[in-house]
Amino acid sequence: MDGEFIKLTLNLLCSTVCCVIGLTVVLAAIGKSLGIRKLYTSVLLSIFEFGKSKIERYEKQRYQREPKDSESHDDSDRSDKETTKNGGDPLIQRDIAIDAYQGIRIPSNRADYDLTNLKKEFHMSDIMYFAKCGVETIIEDEVTKCFTAEELRTWNFLTRTTHGHQYVSVRLTVLWCLGCLLRYLLLPFRLVLLSIGLSWLLISTAVIGLLPDISLRRQLNRYASLICHRILCRACSAVVTYHGRENMVKNGICVANHTSPLDVIILSCDNCYSLVGQRHGGFLGLVMKLLARTADHIYFERSEVKDRFIVAKRLKEHVEDKNKLPILIFPEGTCINNTSVMMFKKGSFEVSDDIYPVAIKYDKRFGDAFWNSSKMGMVQHIFDLLTSWALVAEVWYLPPMHRNENESAVDFANRVKKEIARQGGLVDLSWDGQLKRMKVKDSWKTKTQDDFSKILKVD
């Protein structure tokens, strides 16, 4: 009797799971949603707010119980710890201008400022400005912190998003245990959806790749690609909000800020693109090969300089062919932790005078979408995403931007980058993202010194 009951229960459970998975795949295929994921994220936000209030109350009571003579010191230490976290207030409040020039203030965008109008005598005390800049850089490097996971101000019940979390109350501990159980119970379900999405990619690209290069092939490829990426998004419990769909690119070059290879999946749920990027090995390299069966993607080796000229030529030919898919490019050339936008490479801005910008912003409260390729492989990154709460993002399709007359490719790239940073609420940085892999150029080190020398009076 007990054996039959267990068998019946297992059959019922398996049937329910199969129905849920089947319904999820069908909804992904037609691009519809029942709103369950949005309800799920809304409930999570309520739990996060509850946990935040409990922790703040606990911290307040703990500091009130401590001796008064150490209260100010502890408050200062706590404040310092909070401000040094990524995503919080910076530890160093850098001057917008060079303040060592006897009150002369130079805007951060020095290229637009006439330094020749500011002349002063040199004083030995001016050296202290450069010493101060050096100490500030040692304490807080604004470039390096863009390549580390963004730390949260408050706990979101994920152990890997907080440092030194302590026991606060029974209710928070129970919530954490239940949340951990829920996330890892969802893991098999998400892995099944991931397998279905990849299997669909494998089968569809193999079949469609056999068809001749006609309009039917392009239509089938578009439909199969949308289904595949929507299934993969649901494997991460993704909730993506798209803004400005009327600005979506139909032909040409689309550029976006880069946080993870997941950006491609997020954008490909709404449109079909040809991709430009570095060749990879392993799991990601396999996916890239599958995608190349049915569309004209452009892959290159970062170490081969000659590839740059070949890529530029292929980009130009691709853009001129109106029958081909729009090209999706991440001009930063590397993944940034979704707090900033770093220097855009000028290559894609030399190919076309019309660019379609896209801004992507992930909600860090539900999980870390940043892929630190120097510290983790693609499989580990996927595992972290599948065991997070969800993937919540907003995508803004910005109006197309045209290159002005006599505007250089570099200036055009900076103008597009500035607009993406403004819309996505990101910090606009002029540093090259390749500093993640290479040393700083000597010309960059002497830039501030050159600015300083321009305002010195020379007899």
Image (spheres, helix red, strand yellow):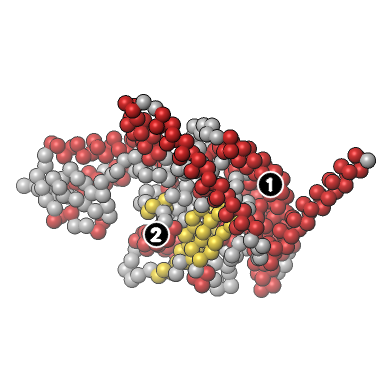
Q: Which residue is at 40% across, 70% downward?
A: 402
Q: Quadrant of residue 401?
A: bottom left
- Disc marking residue 291: none
- The answer to whether 114 appears left or right of 77 in the picture is left
The residue nearer to you, when weighing 208 against 374, is 374
Residue found 59% across the figure and 65% down from its top? 270
Q: Position of residue 174 (x, y in %)?
A: 62, 37
Q: Secondary structure at mark 2?
A: helix
* Circle 1/circle 2 CB separation < 8 Å: no
Residue type at mark 2 is: Arg
Quarter-wise, where is residue 210 in the image? bottom right
Q: Camera-side residue: 208 or 184?
A: 184
In this view, 76 is above or below 53: above
Q: Nearer the viewer, residue 261 or 392?
A: 392
Residue, disc 2: 422
Image quarter where the N terminus lies is top right
User: Which residue occupies the extreme right position in the image?
Assistant: 1
* Neighbours of disc 2 within 10 Å: few (<14), some (14-19), many (20+): some
Check disc 1 and report its element: helix, strand or loop: helix
Label 1 sits on what residue type? Leu
Query: Vertically, is 15 above or below 80?
Result: below
> In front of the other: label 1 or label 2?
1
Where is residue 449? Give x, y as percent. 22, 44
Q: How many marks?
A: 2
Q: Position of residue 430 (x, y in %)?
A: 35, 51
Q: Is residue 22 left or right of residue 290?
A: right
Q: Position of residue 238 (x, y in %)?
A: 60, 55
**Mark 1 residue crowding within 10 angstroms, few (<14) / some (14–19) / many (20+):** some
Task: Say which residue label 1 marks.
Answer: 186
Residue at image point 34% right, 63% down = 408
Answer with the quarter of the image where residue 196 lies. Answer: bottom right
Distance of mark 1 from mark 2, alpha carbons? Answer: 36 Å
